[in-house]
């Protein structure tokens, strides 16, 4: 957080990414009657070696973005440029099956649910060794040695490798998931709410492990979460999503201290403060989250926004760079018509 | 888990290092189901006896005792050489005990063959349907539903009437014919007719397994670990065979053991109606069928094949129940 990582090249560039899930009606002759716009024109980038936190409330499309980057879903439109170690700069959205296989050696995923993400009938050796085996990188005793090493790296004992997942606690299972993701030495790891299913005390352990591993292996993280204090702890930069769109992105401290979008302000004010004596001006949000199948006109946030003006109802704001007081201008992006004039409340030091 | 309790927990786990394999756990829980254990023993006994049929049988399968003055004759009748007919002789003078042993072999073989083939086939189709979903799932599911609407018995009757009466023979490679004739202890020509019956039963036998596995595959393939496998570069075939099927196997095993009992009964019913396996190949069903003409004068005749038939079909049901309980992951270990 103290260094400026802006000289580092971009590992991932997402350009105008869209994913619309069609809503179908009828039997046999299905008709498309609409679409859920889970991700609707999102652009962002991640620099090599940094952690981008992606936050937003449930159902805003965070997880879908993670899946799109890995091509677990096919995007409706847009590009996902990835600087692959072997293949060079490729558009993930346009790779064929063979290239995807290649790509997935360099892009891995850590899941939210440490229970359903591990096959209950496989031993740790088989679970963690699966990627190595599938890519023909190791077998037999060599595989065992590699798995043992991976288990050690994530803080599990190598003797555990003959056991089944049910013998482990949630935190330990999440470590197993991390070991599996690291097996192929990926460049990018998409962490899909990796700690939100865990106890707070265990959350810290996993977060620290992820940070240590990032330093050790030069990993780049896309860290998806709805927990702002977790995101503040681990991220170099943060992107905020609302109903399939990015509303703001900035370096972590900038975003938390000087939010420029009313939604970010509302999110920040919703985080409980550990000190009961601190009285903050809460910015309560009224109304419901917009339905991604029938989003509102203009700015998607306008029905809930207390700074709304007439322009917000009609014209959709674009994500644009905005200058911050001290920092470099190019790193703070916001999509709000009134970003320059509004004075919004930030928070200092959540975690 | 707090930092304080962690070493204690870890030490507790150290003892557990020699984990019970899942098979052992299932076996231990199966043993608690008394009826299932008794059934297993009885069925294994009948199975063993049928395996040893040629050694145990006192007479030839189709040997006719011409010396007996009455046919059928009750249990305990002696032939001229003084050898005892343990269960008597049938209307043609053939030793019933001998034929019962051979019939056990045929009936059990048919049941095992049918269940093995149909459960495997159903399992694969179901896994494919559930895993891939979409159009593949739609086609397979509609076929299954269509076949389920067909009333089974009349169709079985029609098919077997056409195929068996017309002497239709399925062309099979010679070694399979020889294998089957060895399995059924019957000449190759008779064995070939049994194959027809097996196929008829398979055609309607795979539906249940397919639906079970489809459901399992559907829910399993939505779990994160399948996505992790894809991210780990696993092929669809590997995911289905190594991960989906082993996880969905428990209900299939239960279904298979229940199906074994069902197939034996269905085969008997067909044979009883004269449309299954034909005399002289003995099965429990056609033994029952021939005995019905004599049952009022010779009431032991239907009991001879009837008792093992009942034991085996009920037994397989108990085993199925026992397996269901033993494989249920929600129960305490």
Image (cartoon, grey):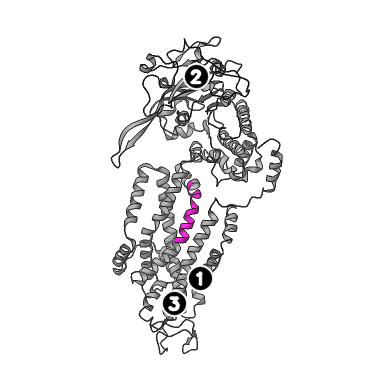
How many C-alpha atoms fall within 10 Å of the one at disc 2: few (<14), some, or many (≥20)? Answer: many
| Residue A292 as seen in the image, left or right of residue A163 | left
Q: What element does badge 1 sit on?
A: helix
| Residue B229 as seen in the image, left or right of residue A156 | left
Tell me residue B320's x, y (percent): 49, 60
Badge 1 is on which residue?
B46
Tell me residue A7's x, y (percent): 55, 15
Q: In this view, does A223 lie above or below A128?
A: above
Magenta stretch secondary structure, dominant: helix
Mark number displayed over residue A249: 2
Looking at the image, can residue B148 be seen? yes
Q: Decide whether residue A275 is among the magenta residues.
A: no
Q: Which of marks 3 and 1 is nearer the N terminus?
A: 1
Labels 3 and 2 touching (C-beta < 8 A): no
Which segment did they paint magenta? B244-258
Badge 3 is on which residue?
B303
Q: Decide whether residue B245 is among the magenta residues.
A: yes
Looking at the image, can residue A15 be seen? no
C-alpha gap between disc 3 and disc 1? 16 Å
Label 2 is found on which chain of the structure? Answer: A
Mark number displayed over residue A175: none
| Residue A62 as seen in the image, left or right of residue A156 | left
Q: Which of B163 and A333 is in front in this view?
A: A333
Label 3 vs label 1, nearer the camera: 3
């Amino acid at each position: 957080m103290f260094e400026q990582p802006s000289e580092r090249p971009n590992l991932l560039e997402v350009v105008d990414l869209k994913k619309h899930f069609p809503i179908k009606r009828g039997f046999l002759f299905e008709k498309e009657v609409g679409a859920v716009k889970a991700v609707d024109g999102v652009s962002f980038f991640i620099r090599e070696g940094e952690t981008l936190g992606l936050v937003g409330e449930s159902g805003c499309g965070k997880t879908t973005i993670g899946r799109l980057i890995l091509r677990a879903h096919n995007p409706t439109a847009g590009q996902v440029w990835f600087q692959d170690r072997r293949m060079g700069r490729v558009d993930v959205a346009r790779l064929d099956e063979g290239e995807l296989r290649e790509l997935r050696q360099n892009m891995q995923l850590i899941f939210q649910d440490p229970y359903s993400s591990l096959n209950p009938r496989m031993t740790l050796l088989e679970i963690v060794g699966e990627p190595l085996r599938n890519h023909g990188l190791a077998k037999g005793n060599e595989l065992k040695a590699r798995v043992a090493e991976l288990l050690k790296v994530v803080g599990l004992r190598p003797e555990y490798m003959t056991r089944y997942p049910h013998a482990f606690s949630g935190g330990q299972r999440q470590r197993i998931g991390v070991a599996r993701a690291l097996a192929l030495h990926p460049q990018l790891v998409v962490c899909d709410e990796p700690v939100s299913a865990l106890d707070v005390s265990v959350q810290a352990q996993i977060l620290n492990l992820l940070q240590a591993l990032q330093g050790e292996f030069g990993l780049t993280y896309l860290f998806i979460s709805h927990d702002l204090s977790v995101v503040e702890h681990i991220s170099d930069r943060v992107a905020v999503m609302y109903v399939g769109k990015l509303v703001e992105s900035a370096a972590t401290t900038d975003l938390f201290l000087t939010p420029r979008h009313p939604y970010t302000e509302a999110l920040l004010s919703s985080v409980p403060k550990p000190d009961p004596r601190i009285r903050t001006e809460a910015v309560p949000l009224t109304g419901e989250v917009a339905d991604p199948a029938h989003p509102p006109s203009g700015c998607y946030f306008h029905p809930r926004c207390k700074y709304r003006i007439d322009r917000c109802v009609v014209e959709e704001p674009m994500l644009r760079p905005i200058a911050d007081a001290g920092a470099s201008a190019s790193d703070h992006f916001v999509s709000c018509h009134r970003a320059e004039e509004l004075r919004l409340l930030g928070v200092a030091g959540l975690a | 888990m707090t930092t304080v309790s962690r070493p204690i927990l870890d030490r507790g786990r150290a003892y557990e290092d020699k984990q019970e394999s899942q098979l052992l756990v299932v076996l231990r829980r199966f043993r608690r189901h008394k009826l299932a254990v008794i059934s297993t023993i009885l069925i294994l006994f009948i199975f063993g006896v049928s395996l040893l049929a040629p050694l145990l049988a006192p007479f030839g399968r189709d040997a006719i005792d011409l010396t007996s003055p009455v046919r059928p004759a009750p249990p305990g009748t002696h032939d001229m050489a003084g050898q005892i007919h343990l269960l008597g002789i049938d209307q043609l003078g053939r030793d019933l005990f001998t034929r019962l042993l051979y019939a056990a072999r045929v009936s059990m073989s048919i049941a095992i063959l049918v269940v093995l083939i149909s459960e495997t086939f159903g399992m694969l189709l179901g896994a494919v349907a559930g895993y891939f979903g979409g159009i593949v799932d739609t086609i397979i599911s509609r076929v299954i539903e269509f076949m389920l609407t067909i009333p089974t018995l009349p169709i079985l009757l029609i098919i077997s009437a056409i195929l068996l009466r017309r002497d239709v023979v399925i062309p099979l490679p010679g070694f399979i014919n020889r294998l089957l004739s060895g399995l059924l202890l019957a000449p190759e020509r008779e064995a070939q007719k049994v194959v027809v019956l097996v196929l008829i039963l398979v055609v309607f036998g795979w539906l249940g397994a397919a639906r079970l596995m489809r459901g399992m595959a559907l829910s399993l393939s939505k779990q994160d670990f399948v996505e992790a496998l894809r991210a780990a570069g696993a092929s669809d075939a590997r995911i289905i065979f190594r991960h989906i099927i082993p996880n969905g196997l428990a209900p299939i095993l239960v279904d298979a053991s229940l199906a074994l009992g069902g197939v034996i009964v269905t085969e008997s019913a067909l044979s009883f109606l004269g449309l299954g396996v034909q005399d002289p190949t003995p099965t429990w069903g056609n033994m029952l069928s021939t005995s019905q003409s004599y049952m009022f004068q010779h009431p032991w005749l239907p009991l001879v094949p009837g008792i093992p038939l009942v034991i085996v079909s009920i037994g397989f049901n108990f085993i199925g129940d026992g397996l269901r309980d033993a494989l249920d992951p929600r129960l305490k270990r």
